[in-house]
Amino acid sequence: MRLLHTMLRVGDLDQSIKFYTEILGMRLLRRKDYPEGKFTLAFLGYGDEKENTVLELTYNWDISSYDLGNGFGHLAIEVNNVYQATEQIRQQGGKILRDAGPMNAGNTIIAFVEDPDGYQIELLAKD
């Protein structure tokens, strides 16, 4: 068994694809419209779906926003240097929720950014 993907519902698919590709460096792996169901799926990631867990963005054509609720936490992305990644995201117009620095009660360097739909992404330093 292996984890295949995480799905997020988004209100503006093109804006979300732009964020994940241009700001976070993922690749758009595939995208397909489902006219009968009135939705589009886009799969993004840092590598091929056959070997990597990817992100599925679901765009329901009649819905422009969602209530995120309080059950979802965040996505986590490993980066070489959290300080540099945070600054690059800031320069590209990304929203920084927590600047890079040691986590509370620990030494791991982390930061948090937010995607266009309000989902939080944690940046973690490589061990």
Image: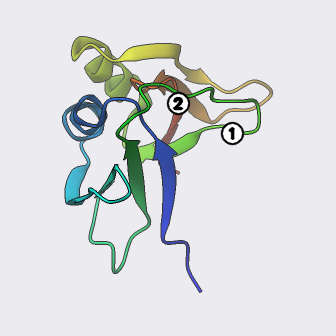
* Residue 14 on image: x %, y %: 22, 34
Q: Residue at the location (51% across, 23% down)?
A: 118
* Residue 68 on image: x %, y %: 63, 29
Q: Secondary structure at mark 2?
A: loop
Which numbered tag is attached to residue 119? Answer: 2
Q: On screen, 91 above or below 49?
A: above
The N terminus sits in image quarter: bottom right
Q: Residue at the location (29% across, 37% down)?
A: 13
Q: On screen, 98 above or below 12?
A: above
Say whether marks 1 and 2 touch (CB < 8 Å).
yes
Q: Residue at the location (20% across, 53% down)?
A: 28
Q: Which residue is mark 1?
A: 72
* Residue 61 on image: x %, y %: 34, 39
Q: On screen, 92 above or below 13?
A: above
Q: On screen, 52 above or below 12?
A: below
Q: Secondary structure at mark 1?
A: loop
Q: Mark 2 Cα within 10 Å, few/some/many (few <14, many 20+)?
A: some
Which numbered tag is attached to residue 48? Answer: none
Q: Label 1 sits on what residue type?
A: Phe
Q: In the orientation shown, which residue stands out farthest toward the right?
A: 105
Q: Nearer the viewer, residue 87 or 96?
A: 96
* Residue 96 on image: x %, y %: 45, 15
Quadrant of residue 34 in the image? bottom left
Q: Label 2 sits on what residue type?
A: Tyr
Q: In the orientation shown, which residue stands out farthest toward the bottom?
A: 1
